[in-house]
Amino acid sequence: MRPPTSHYYKPRPRWQEADWPGLTGRLKGRLVPPPPKPPSPNQLDQWFSSALSTLTMAIEGTAPRSRRSPRSKGWWTPLLTTLRKEFTKPYPRAKQFRTPDSYSIVRQSKLGYFKAIKRAKATYWADFLAKTSPNNIWTAKQRVATRKTPRCPSLPDASNPVAVNNALLNHLFPSKDPLPSRGRVKRNPSATPLTKEEIKLAHSKSTPSLAPGPDGVPYPVWKRVKLINPAIILELPSPLVAFGDHPPSLKTANGVILDKPGKVSYDSPSSFRIIILRKTISKILEWVMTVRLSTIARSEGLLHLNQCGSLPRRSSSAPCLTLMYQIKTLQRPKLEVSSLFLDIKAGFDNANASTLRARLLASRVLSYMVDWVSSFLSERT
């Protein structure tokens, strides 16, 4: 997040109309340049940022851009463009001659134009509902539901948009003690190279409809790139794993501020929450490292016996069913049963990176993974 700038909507690529055969010719024999040896963190970030930007520009060059508008009309058709021209063309003539015939032509063209808009909207909505799946069923519900008025943050001590932005940033991202800076990074001999199976599994676990981050490249596009040239997706993040580094170029993200429902007042930053949209290529690497950390945590016995949720074969539904069973068992002899739930507020967000690094090293986690986790948690604002 940054202080607000001028109101500008960057045209987004229309990936459905991308020239995939043309992209195949561009990427078929493409190679990722090797990183510098031995690099500093800044040099490694420059190498990765340059390689990713070059690849992203090549991909975006095959997709046409949407028009510059905050509300693109998916139902618009070329026929409507023609009818709009016919609708606006008779106006100057009608104003000039002011005859019944000229006004009649204007009314007929106007009536035909707006009827065509209604038909286009109805056709687009029917086609959308026909293609509805469990992945986009909530999108259909939101489109028919009554839209609530968005609540803009109105903070007492913030008199302008920049002050509101800074107040939200300070609340959502409190300052933390930074980790010691690294010098030259070295390739760790214990680092396990990325495999095609890991990348393939990460793609299979991704959600195609998930909104992308600042790069604007969704998951389905990276899947296409992987099919065209699997070496690109494998060679681009592999040096980051070997050097145990997560560069700053992958830490930039888009933040969407949403109001928390049911609040009495919205004059405090705590009445709002944020959704972070990171770069999809970063999420692929994060998923691979998460699976590796989970495997080590299981093998080394680092997980608590009662820890559940967000882990394979440790679903949170089992403890819920156990709790329900125990409550009903105690209620049969007409005993009073109470349950106490504790919520550690912002526990993950406020984790101390230095303490976490020390505990990972003490738990015999491989050094390259400890370096990557430390780099992942550092230089975040």
Image (tube, helix red, strand yellow):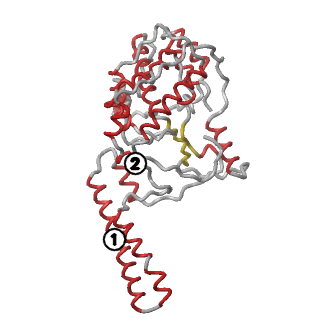
Name of the residue lying farthest toward the left: 130
Q: Spatial distance from mark 2 to mark 1, Cα to Cα?
A: 24 Å
Q: Nearer the viewer, residue 240 or 18?
A: 18
Quadrant holding the N terminus: top right
Q: Residue at x 47, y 38 (%)?
A: 57
Q: Which residue is mark 1?
A: 116
From this view, report whether residue 319 is shown above or below residue 158.
Answer: above
Confirm whether residue 178 shows in the render. Answer: yes
Quarter of the figure with residue 88? bottom left
Identify residue type, mark 2.
Arg
Where does residue 219 sit, x and y in percent of width and height? 39, 36
From this view, report whether residue 6 is shown above or below residue 299.
Answer: below
Q: Give SS at disc 1.
A: helix
Identify residue type, mark 1.
Ala
Q: Which residue is mark 2?
A: 14
Q: Give SS at disc 2.
A: loop
